[in-house]
Structure formats: structure tokens, C-alpha cells
Amino acid sequence: MNTWTICARWLLDARRALLGWGLGLISICLLYLPLFPSMRDSGLIGDKLAVMPQGMIDSFGMDIVTISTGWGYTHQMIFGMLGLLLMLVLGISTGAAAIAGDEESGSLEMTLAHATDRRALISARLVALLGIVLGMTALLALTVAAFSAPSQLGLTAAGLLGEGLALGLLTALHALTAFAAGAAGARRAVASSLATLVGICGWFLHHMGGKVADWLPQLSPFHWAYGATPLRHGVDMGGLALLGAVCLMLIAVSYLLFERRDLRA
């Protein structure tokens, strides 16, 4: 059983769940993006911000000037909040299930018993995991692009490319954190919790860290992804390089730890 066979089998088994996730991402765009012209013209965006506590506004990185623009509204509602949340939950849950979940269920040992070595197995799961993240990110970005003109968002191809790459690598980083924890021997719940903790800490460092020290946001993967506002200015190679470097490190750690440890019975 080779790497591609294992990868295809795992993706095939997950097809119904992935269809649901994809429909969820499309639904968010369908629900929120067409509302932008009426909310902007009526001043409803400003009214909603006015009644929110300042701490909540700061924690979400919102301000009336930015969110009243097409790119600001799209980033806040889709790439910075609702779509981002769905992508992170998908990535973390899938990353935790890839090794830790199968090990707990006993199916991991059965797969390895069918003339498959550990390197082929972990390669297959990594390809499937990253393929899911890439596919869902592309689906979200293309859906937003389809709504750009009808919803008067004024988004550019360069901006969508930059924002999509940032979201994809940010999701991959958290998914690979859960994956690496599972490869190291952590149980599924522990792997998910660790990646979630990384996400929560990164979120608050990005949005609130500057109130403590100017350099704190620079430690956050969210800042690497969105600090240069790629939806407005296009691809940020520096931020993408940092995200990519951490992803490669997590992949290397996953291989190293999985090949050297004993699997649970």
C-alpha cells in the first residue's frame, strides 16, 4: 500500500464531512458579503460598533474607518473572524485526527500492518491534511472573489491572493501543530487543545499585545499573516516566509518523533 493510496483512502472516507465544511464556508460568504452595500450606505456598521464595549472592539481589531471599506469588511467578517474560525476548527480537528485519532481507534496499527512503513503513512496523512487546507482555502477565496463585484467590495486579485495565502498558511500552522502533537504521542484531545491554545495566544498577541509592548504582536502567527493587510496591499512575502518556515519545522518534527516512538496498543 503506497503513500498515494493511503492518502486517497483517507480523503475518500472524509468526503461527506469535507462537503459540509465547504458548504459552511460558502454559506458565510452568502450571508454576510451581500449585506455590505446597505450597511455601509445606511451607517449601520458604525452604529453596531458604537454599542459594543471597547475591549471587544480592540480584541477583534475593528475600527469604523477600516470596516467601512470593502476590503476591511471582507477581512473582518470572513478572513479575520467567521471564515477564519471555521478554517482553524477544520484544520485543528483534522490534524489531531490524522495520527492521534487513528491511533486511539486502533486503525493506525492496522494500516501499518498492511505492508506500509511509518514514513509512507505520515507522508500520506500530511499530503491529505495540507490538501484539505489548500482546497478549502481556495474554495473560500474563490467564493469571496465571486461576490466582490455584486457586493461592491472592490477587491483585487493580488489582494485575494495575498489574503488567501496568508489564511492557508495560518490554518496549516495550527493544523500541523495538532498533527505534530499526535505524531509525538499525544492523545487526540490533547493535540487539539495544544493547537487551540496556540491559536488563542496568537490571537490575543496580535490584537492586544501592542497594549503591553510594541514588539509582542510580532510574535503572533496572526500578525505574520495579516499584519501587512494583504487583502489591501497584496502578498506579504515576509509574513508568508515566517509562516512557511514554522510549517516546515512542524513537518520535520512530526517525521522525527513519529518514526522513533512506540505506538500505543
Image (spheres, rainbow, N blue to C red):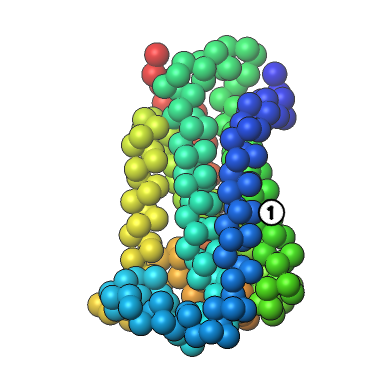
In the image, residue 175 above or below residue 38: above
Rendered-image quadrant of the N terminus: top right
Could you tell whether 216 is left or right of 15 in the image? left
- Secondary structure category for the residue under label 1: helix
Could you tell whether 110 is left or right of 215 in the image? right
Residue at point 35%, 57% (across, down): 200
Q: Across the whole image, how many numbered discs are drawn on residues?
A: 1
Residue 241 in percent (x, y) is at 57, 65
Using the rendered view, name the quadrant where residue 238 is placed: bottom right
Using the rendered view, name the quadrant where residue 151 is placed: bottom right
Rendered-image quadrant of the C terminus: top left
Residue at point 73%, 72% (across, down): 150
Residue at point 67%, 25% (across, down): 9
Q: Which of 264 and 226 lies nearest the eye of the viewer?
A: 226
Q: Which of 50 and 233 lies nearest the eye of the viewer?
A: 50
**Residue 217 shows up from this direction:** no
Q: Which of 44 and 247 lies nearest the eye of the viewer?
A: 44
In the image, residue 32 above or below residue 53: above
Binning the other alpha carbons within 10 Å of mark 1 as few (below 14), some (14 to 19) or many (20 upward) gives some
Residue 130 in percent (x, y) is at 61, 45
**Residue 62 shows up from this direction:** yes
Using the rendered view, name the quadrant where residue 122 is placed: top right
Residue 229 in percent (x, y) is at 55, 77
Residue 257 in percent (x, y) is at 44, 34
Could you tell whether 197 is left or right of 241 in the image? left
In the image, residue 135 above or below residue 153: above
What amino acid type is highlighted by mark number 1? Answer: Leu
- Give the labeled residue for mark 1: 139
Q: Which of 162 and 17 lies nearest the eye of the viewer?
A: 17
Residue at point 33%, 66% (across, down): 204
In the image, residue 79 above or below residue 178: below
